[in-house]
Image (cartoon, rainbow, N blue to C red):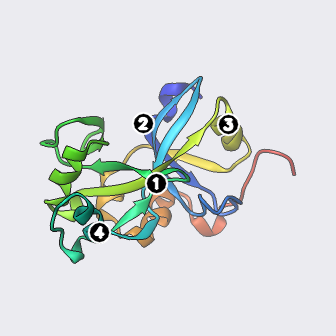
Amino acid sequence: MTVSDLAPGILIAVPQMDDPNFHRSVVLLVEHGESGAMGIVFNRPSDIALADIGQEHGMDVSDEAGVAFLGGPVQRERGFLVHRRTDVTDSVKLDEDVFLSVSTDALKTLLAGDPASYRLCLGYAGWGPGQLEREMVAGGWLNSTISAKRIFDTPVEKIWDAVIRDLGIDPAFLVQGGGKQ
């Protein structure tokens, strides 16, 4: 497994994942290298309304806009915008139709638009050097390619199941492997 094989990409937590921060999580892996890895969970809704976040930034955002997501256990006060809009400045293209931004200007642009075109994720997941590789060898994660369809178009409660099925795996038969028995 080389660095380019994982990021940008998707990590899928196996059902036996012990860490409650990642139970049935799907992570957009943004960076991976010798110094570690960084990703954003995009399928764990929070109880923080986007309307409240908009209000903090002086914007009127509809209550129908939904909620922010828990992007991971690190720096939950920091927001990451995963979106599909090519017109948002200060964005990094991760894949076809998937972009990442962290700017306040991007937040204002996206909050004023279609909520189906973005996810505001609070916090991120981080791994130290070699940590993610060890967790993968122990069978804690599956990996896949980025799918805008799964990030934006699949109902949030079905994302985990759908990305595993996209790999040709029935989640009911998924068993943790590798590591010590």
Q: Secondary structure at mark 2?
A: loop
In this orientation, which residue lies closer to the viewer: 141 or 115?
115
Return the disc, 4 or 1, that comes first in the chain's sequence: 4
- At label 4, the amino acid type is Asp
Return the disc, 3 or 1, that comes first in the chain's sequence: 1
Choose top left, top right, bottom left or bottom right for residue 112.
Answer: bottom left
Label 1 packing within 10 angstroms: few (<14), some (14-19), many (20+): many
In this orientation, which residue lies closer to the viewer: 176 or 168?
176
Q: Nearer the viewer, mark 2 or mark 4?
A: 4
Choose top left, top right, bottom left or bottom right for residue 55.
Answer: bottom left
Label 4 packing within 10 angstroms: few (<14), some (14-19), many (20+): some
Label 3 packing within 10 angstroms: few (<14), some (14-19), many (20+): few
Return the disc, 3 or 4, that comes first in the chain's sequence: 4
Q: Secondary structure at mark 1?
A: loop
Q: CA distance from mark 3 to mark 1?
A: 19 Å
**Residue at mark 1:** 71
- At label 3, the amino acid type is Gln
> In the figure, is residue 63 to the left or right of 22?
left
In this orientation, which residue lies closer to the viewer: 74 or 131?
74
Q: Nearer the viewer, mark 4 or mark 1?
A: 4
Q: CA distance from mark 4 to mark 1?
A: 18 Å
Q: Which mark is residue 52?
A: 4
Residue 86: give x, y in percent of width and height. Answer: 16, 42
Q: Nearer the viewer, mark 3 or mark 1?
A: 1
**Residue at mark 2:** 8
Q: Nearer the viewer, mark 3 or mark 4?
A: 4
- At label 1, the amino acid type is Gly
- At label 2, the amino acid type is Pro
**Residue at mark 3:** 131
